[in-house]
Image: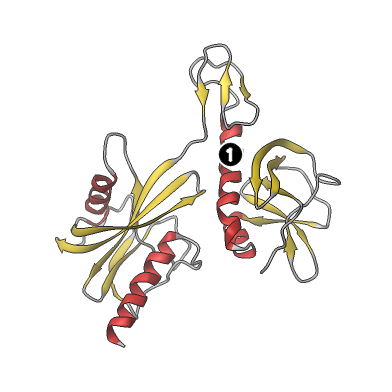
Amino acid sequence: MQTSFPTTCWLVFQNDHLLFIKHKTHFTLPTTQNNMPTFLREIQLGMFNDQLCYCAEIASDASLPVQYELIPLRKSFELLEPIWYSLVVKAYSVINWDKNHQYCGRCGHITSHQSHIFERLCEHCGLAVYPRISPSVIVLIQKGDELLMARSPHFTKGVYGLIAGFVEAGESIEEAIHREVREEVNINIQNLHYFGSQPWPFPDSLMIGFTAEYASGELMIDNNEIEEAGWYRYDNLPGRPSSNISIAGKLINYFIEKKQQQYH
């Protein structure tokens, strides 16, 4: 669904939902502060496509006029043109950073948001806090025509994904991938290749994607992280991620297309 560019861009959140103006056949982003719900915070994001853009948040219990609709953040990506993705992720991350660092984590005093930069400063002890970015790895593992897919207990029923996890302090990205694979499914991998990266706002990840090949070992899942895992042929995969926006969906599509080209 297409959305037109407003003169001034407002990305307004309530909890994990993005605010839209609903029309009979489509949705648009708010274009002005007039008649908008009361903001808890508003932060200037900067220029985007020759527009001045802001992010803001409204109270979790605030009611909305009938012309507005709140749409879950994941679903909102499907309503917006792809070029909006990075800005929406940035807006959501900045709002949460600002909300979660109202007080200094070192001395407990109130922090203040510095003008025109994403920095909250404690004027009592001098601690500066910036938006958090958590590096995460995700890897597509293939064994011939088969792909390793797994599902975590928190996944939507029937949906499978790839092996993924956060990079821990003191380890490289490559070390994190090998560790996550061994911990979650007890196998070894080889021929690790970089695929791409993607900011992912759940909650503040930078997903770093790789492809790899099975090397050795028998599947044995970590029941604390994984409830099911198995090898699936490229043309008979279980419930794939419903959206191709995520890097998991892009990795899986890449594998399928490569195999289809190989056999046709």
Name the image quarter holding the C terminus: bottom left
Residue beneath disc 1: 94
Task: Describe residue 171's horizontal placement relative to residue 36 as left or right.
Answer: left
Image quarter of residue 69: bottom right
Name the image quarter holding the N terminus: bottom right
In this picture, is 244 found above or below 130? below
Q: Residue at x 34, y 81 (%)?
A: 235
Q: Residue at x 48, y 50 (%)?
A: 199
What amino acid is labelled 1 in the image? Val
Q: Which residue is drawn at 26% across and 58% down?
A: 193
Task: Describe residue 208's horizontal placement relative to residue 85 as left or right.
Answer: left
Secondary structure found at label 1: helix
In this picture, is 170 found above or below 160? above
Q: Residues within 10 Å of mark 1 (few under 14, many from 20)?
A: many
Farthest residue in the top direction? 124
Give whichever of 166, 257 is nearer the camera: 257
Task: Describe residue 80's horizontal placement relative to residue 39 as left or right.
Answer: left
Q: Position of residue 155 (x, y in %)?
A: 45, 59
Farthest residue in the bottom direction? 264
Q: Where is residue 4 in the image (x, y as percent from the top left)?
A: 72, 62
Q: Residue at x 73, y 42 (%)?
A: 61
Q: Where is residue 226 in the image (x, y as percent from the top left)?
A: 33, 56
Answer yes or no: is residue 11 visible: no
Q: Where is residue 243 in the image (x, y as percent from the top left)?
A: 51, 66
